[in-house]
Amino acid sequence: MSDIHFGTDGWRAIIGEDFTEGNLRKVVDAAAQVFAEGASEAGAQPGELGVLYVGHDCRQDAHRYAQIAAETAAAHGFRVKLTQDYCPTPALCWSVAHDDEAVGGIMLTSSHNPAEYLGVKLRMADGGASPKEFTDRVELVMDADEGAPADAAEVPDEAVCEAVHGHGSQVCAQAGTVSEADLMTPYLAALRELVDVEAIRAAGLRVVVDPLFGAGRLYLADLLRDMGVEVVEMNNACDPTFDGLHPEPIPPWVDRGLAKVRELGYDALFINDGDADRIGAGDSRGNFVNPHRIIALVTEHMVDRGETGRVVSTITASALLDRLCRKLGLELVSTPVGFKWIYGEMEKGGVMVGGEESGGIGLPGHVKERDGLLMALLLTEMMAQTGKDLGTLVDEMLDDLGHLEFARRGLTVTDAQMDAFRTRTIPTFAPDEVCGKRVVGEDRRDGVKFMLEGDAWVMMRPSGTEPLVRIYAEAETVDQVEGLLDWAQGVVEDGSGC
């Protein structure tokens, strides 16, 4: 059986170890077969399977790997459009969704993982995340090929396109093509159409942008500057080592940006992850604005813009969002962790906004995917239209909804601890109270979550790909949150609690 597996959103591995040319070809070859099956079921004829988009982030040799992926997919008969340069994942998704001939996309990225990782995300014809049924099928195809000769994962020489140069295209032996395409110009133009540019231009805003050396670098800063915003961009060099930072928009990786916005006293700090589909933020005082608060701000702003519909978030969502939706009369839908579950709700229709605790927030009217650049523009629009900086907007929201604090930890566990957690804690552990707070509800769809009095909660969830259990907690004070996390850590590590 193949040791390549898709996690919450894609396959990721260390470059030069498990992420090799051979393994990349194996993954893309299987994915292209599954895309081709879907195209054929939809009535496509051989040689007319449609378009596949291939994009990549700023990792070491990412464009070369993307070329390999494009050539492998083209060998199946697809017309492949390969990004000219690095691009955010939402740019690839938007390009797929707005091309009637596109059947899907392949994005080479490892998102928020450290610089030594690279991976593959698969996207469907509407730009949304590939559902589990699709990636399960890809894994089955790879497993079926395991018994073939060792070089079977390689594309036969006669079916491989030559490397693409400039803007031309090469024809593969099986009638597929690879051509380079500008994914950024139309995508950035579409983003401009989604916000009130004149209000932003008139507001005289000043912001710090920190792309964490990822695929949002230069793009978001230049877009804001073009709208009249004064921008200081940091961590934006072409540095595939990311200067030792993890491209994840949470502390401690955002500390440089928080120090800079505090030093300058600017209106806001916007932070994106490695492929720019997530967002974190900071205010002029250098306080981190976590994604829970951003989701709530965006939801209320969309209602102010006259939008309506369901709000979808994951099981790790803040109680703030529940309070806000009850206040606004909106239906709130909870899903397991992973944007693919939010995407599943978007497919059903009637969703206004979907977001997750990790900072991935999307508007299905734009594309059924997270978009960290769009979220930064919407926060900019809020400040422009209200005349208030980001910190003031957050303070007013918390004064209205009530103050809640949130934190999470990742716990590396032994095999025995993980086995005990999966077989005993998740299905059967049921305390009456946690750290002096009465348990008022539970949710075991994705790990185990205990809802406590006063809208506090604590959750423990195993990783699907690592020896890791993630614990989350929310309560009225930082001390209460730390107490809940200590309790959860005790439960995971030795069953003791607090």
Image (cartoon, rainbow, N blue to C red):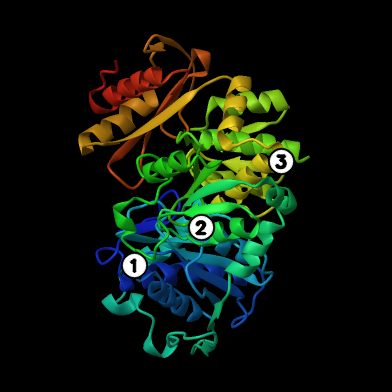
Of labels 1 and 2, earlier in sequence is 1
Identify which residue, 87 or 149, lies in the foreground. Answer: 87
Residue depth check, mark 3 versus mark 1: number of the one nearer the observer: 3
Q: Tell me what residue is drawn at x 27 percent, y 76 percent.
A: 150
Mark 3–mark 1 Cα distance, whole angstroms, equals: 40 Å
Of labels 3 and 1, earlier in sequence is 1
The amino acid on which the numbered mark 1 sits, given as a three-letter code, is Gln
Q: Which mark is residue 60?
A: 1
Compared across the picture, whether 298 is left or right of 276 comes to right
Q: Is residue 234 above or below residue 154?
A: above
Q: Which mark is residue 348?
A: none
Compared across the picture, whether 53 is left or right of 10 comes to right
Name the residue tied to disc 3: 385
Which image quadrant is residue 458 in?
top left
Say what secondary structure mark 1 lies in: loop
Q: Tell me what residue is drawn at x 30 percent, y 69 percent.
A: 20
Residue 437 position within the rendered picture, expressed as x and y whole percent measured from the top left: 43, 11
Which image quadrant is residue 329 in?
top right
Asked if disc 1 and disc 2 are in contact, CB closer than 8 Å, the reply is: no
Residue depth check, mark 2 versus mark 3: number of the one nearer the observer: 3
Name the residue tied to disc 2: 134
Say what secondary structure mark 2 lies in: helix
Of labels 2 and 3, earlier in sequence is 2
Q: Is residue 197 visible?
A: yes
Residue depth check, mark 1 versus mark 2: number of the one nearer the observer: 1
The amino acid on which the numbered mark 2 sits, given as a three-letter code, is Phe
